[in-house]
Image (cartoon, coloured by chain):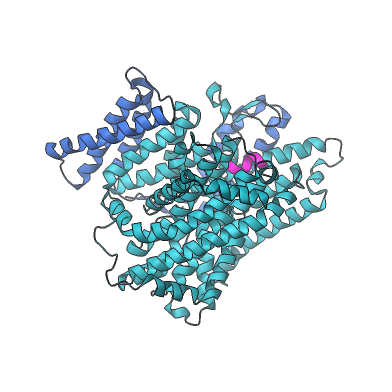
């Protein structure tokens, strides 16, 4: 998908928004703690303004291209965040099994409908790999993974 | 010398040899996956080193690094897709060779060049790092500030086209480095009343997010793993000894490429992609037949692959001596060093000299291991990589990165930060703000801040405090280098804009 967007102005806008976000809480800090961030904030603001001016006077790219399906991109990104929330609520093992299975199914659908037989064939692969990683991290590497309501 | 022999002895154990073999193979596998960079290979495999002893962990990461840089050449040659950014220049001649049925010749040439490059890099590291480490103790806060600034001038080469956007990314990275407790004042900054943020943004969390997540989202959006099916390995291959004779028969090309790789590797922030492009350009410039480049000239592959493998060990010089990563993957190695309580500098070569030398020598061993692993396993690894469906790759890589991020500090918040940075990083990349300058800012921000604030503190009674930044000869030299570095970065842009320099082909632009 191709979107018409002045990337210089967009980048400058992002820089200004980020600078504003950090500019507001700076007043509560002592001199030694703020001296460096303040200098960088000023530099960031100058660069962002310069980008906006450049975007108006001599713009660079005026379009951005999202290769592939933007919908799939957003669904997968949202899926990652849902997975993260689910890890805290349900535990790593259960949430990862569900998330990996759902993502594999969703992404495999790009090439066409996924039959039940094919889905059934993936179950042992996904189960085996997720459980293997779970065991490696918990038993070998001694990492205490989140358990949540389940495991 | 005694330490070197002791290190060599500690390396000649079954565990170490197996670690190198497994590390090189794993690096080769990940490096050959398009989009998965050496940084990502290290980031993904990092958690597996947590439970290892320090030397074994470092050996594993060094081997993975070496293997992944070499592995990038596989897909670069076979399907014109650089597996890692370092192998961009390998595609220019490697792919035409593969299309001419000379895939084996190109792969064998790349392997031999990588082995030689890797060994040369290790030799440079052994020779240059100890004296540089002694010299590093002369670096006070002001000097470290200038070193950080010198690294930041490389934002220009990492920003792919727009210097302003690169600078903006660098500033964002430096500001991200200030989140948490201030290193000098001790106050909490930019946590927005959320106590868990007091720990700041862990470098590796940001690295994983900014490098891995955008690639996964791209693969998901495109709905393919970028690799077409088919076997282009070539059956009518020539003998390895004949390829070796051809590569070694042109020592000037090898030596020049290795020297270029080493010089650029010492400069903090310049990655293997920069070294291989420069070496390739110089090989073409000095060739008697420059027109054959881009049409299947083995010298082009040799120049690219030897220089980027020199960079693997070469970029450790600023890392081990000054704590400045010479390339993005080095940031992961720095994280592991710090994790084991090892601080870059002279102590690394004196108090923990056996460990440091063992790590350096293990990279030489990894370079040698590339030969059998690369030649015997190439076809098998290629088939595994090409036949793994992308719809399995995306969720499983995501799972491993989540596990790795969580395991760093047992923090689910870190996983969230990684996902947020990765998702934002994807959209920033769309508008031309690359991940590399942000990461460079994040790494160097802390160093610059500590140097700057400590210098200002020491100069509190001076009439003009900031003059303390250039009060001694070394800081003056470094400040001059910063100006020179910025000038050399800006000059080509100015020449290009004013039409005095032929515009570089878009294909030579750095891949993030």
Judge left or right: residue A123 versus residue B140: left
User: Residue A21 falls in which quadrant of the image?
Assistant: top right
Judge left or right: residue B429 versus residue B449: left
| Residue at the bottom extreme, as displayed | B288
Of A70 and B247, nearer the camera is B247
- Residue drawn at x 72%, y 31% is A32
Image coords of residue B27 (percent x, y): 42, 50
Judge left or right: residue B342 versus residue B42: right
Q: Is residue B199 above or below residue B458?
A: above
Of A127 and A44, nearer the camera is A127
Question: Is B445 included in the stretch rendered in magenta?
Answer: yes
Magenta range is B442-447
Per the rendering, the colour in which chain B appears is cyan
- Residue drawn at x 47%, y 62% is B114
User: From this viewpoint, is residue A75 visible?
Assistant: yes
Of A76 and B116, nearer the camera is B116
User: Residue B74 falls in which quadrant of the image?
Assistant: bottom left
Per the rendering, the colour in which chain A appears is blue
| Residue at the top extreme, as displayed | A149
- Residue drawn at x 73%, y 53% is B478
Question: Is B41 included in the stretch rendered in magenta?
Answer: no
Q: Is residue A31 above or below residue A67?
A: above
Image coords of residue B265 (percent x, y): 59, 57
- Residue drawn at x 47%, y 79% is B290
Q: Main secondary structure of the magenta part?
A: helix
Image coords of residue B380 (percent x, y): 30, 55
Q: Is residue B228 above or below residue B174?
A: below
């Amino acid at each position: 998908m191709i979107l018409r967007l002045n990337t210089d102005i967009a980048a400058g806008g992002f820089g200004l928004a980020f600078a504003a976000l950090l500019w507001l809480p700076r007043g509560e800090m002592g001199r030694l703690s703020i001296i460096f961030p303040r200098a960088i904030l000023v530099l960031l603001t100058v660069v962002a303004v310069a980008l906006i001016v450049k975007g108006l006077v001599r713009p660079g790219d005026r379009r951005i291209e999202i290769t592939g399906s933007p919908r799939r991109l957003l669904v997968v990104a949202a899926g990652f965040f849902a997975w993260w929330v689910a890890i805290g609520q349900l535990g790593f093992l259960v949430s990862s099994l569900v998330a990996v299975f759902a993502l594999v199914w969703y992404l495999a659908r790009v090439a066409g409908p996924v039959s039940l037989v094919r889905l059934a064939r993936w179950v042992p692969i996904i189960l085996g790999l997720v459980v293997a990683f779970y065991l490696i991290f918990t038993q070998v590497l001694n990492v205490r993974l989140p358990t949540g309501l389940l495991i | 010398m005694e330490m070197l022999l002791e290190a060599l002895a500690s390396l000649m154990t079954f565990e170490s040899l197996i670690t190198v073999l497994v590390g090189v193979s794993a690096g080769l596998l990940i490096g050959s996956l398009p989009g998965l960079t050496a940084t990502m290979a290290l980031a993904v495999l990092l958690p597996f080193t947590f439970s290892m002893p320090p030397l074994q962990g470092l050996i594993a990461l060094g081997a993975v690094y070496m293997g992944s840089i070499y592995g990038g050449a596989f897909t670069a040659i076979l399907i014109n897709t650089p597996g890692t950014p370092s192998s961009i220049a390998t595609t220019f001649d490697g792919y035409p060779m593969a299309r001419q049925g000379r895939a084996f010749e190109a792969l064998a040439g790349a392997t031999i060049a990588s082995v030689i490059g890797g060994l040369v890099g290790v030799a440079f590291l052994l020779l240059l790092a100890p004296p540089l480490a002694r010299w590093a103790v002369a670096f006070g806060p002001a000097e470290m500030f200038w070193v950080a600034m010198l690294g930041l001038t490389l934002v220009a080469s990492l920003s792919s086209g727009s210097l302003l956007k690169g600078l903006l990314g660098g500033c964002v990275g430096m500001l991200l480095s200030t989140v948490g407790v201030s290193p000098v004042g001790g106050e909490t900054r930019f946590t927005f009343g959320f106590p868990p943020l007091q720990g700041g943004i862990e470098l590796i969390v940001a690295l994983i997010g900014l490098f891995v997540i955008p690639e996964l989202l791209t693969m998901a959006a495109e709905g393919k793993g970028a690799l077409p099916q088919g076997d282009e390995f070539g059956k009518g291959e020539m003998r390895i000894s004949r390829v070796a004779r051809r590569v070694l028969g042109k020592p000037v090309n090898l030596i020049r490429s290795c020297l270029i790789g080493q010089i650029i590797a010492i400069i903090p922030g310049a990655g293997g992609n920069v070294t291989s492009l420069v070496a390739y350009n110089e090989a073409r410039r000095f060739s008697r037949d420059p027109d054959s480049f881009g049409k299947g000239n083995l010298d082009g592959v040799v120049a690219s692959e030897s220089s980027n493998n020199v960079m693997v060990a070469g970029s450790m010089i600023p890392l081990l001596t000054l704590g400045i990563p010479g390339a993005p993957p080095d940031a992961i190695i720095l994280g592991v060093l710090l994790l084991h309580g090892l601080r870059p500098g002279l102590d690394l070569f004196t108090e923990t000299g056996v460990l440091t030398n063992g790590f350096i020598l293990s990279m030489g061993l990894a370079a040698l291991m590339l030969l059998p692993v690369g030649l015997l396993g190439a076809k098998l690894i290629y088939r595994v990589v090409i036949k793994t469906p992308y719809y399995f790759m995306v969720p499983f890589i995501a799972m491993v990165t989540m596990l790795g991020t969580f395991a760093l500090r047992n923090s689910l918040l870190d996983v969230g930060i990684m996902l947020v940075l990765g998702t934002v990083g994807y959209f920033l990349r769309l508008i031309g703000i690359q991940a590399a300058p942000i990461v460079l800012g994040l790494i160097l921000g802390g160093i610059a801040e500590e140097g700057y604030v400590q210098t200002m503190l020491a100069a509190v009674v001076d009439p003009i405090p900031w003059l303390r930044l250039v009060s001694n000869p070394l800081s003056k030299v470094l400040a001059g280098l910063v100006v020179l570095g910025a000038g050399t970065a800006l000059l080509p842009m100015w020449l290009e804009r004013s039409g005095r320099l032929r515009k570089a082909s878009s294909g030579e632009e750095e891949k993030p």
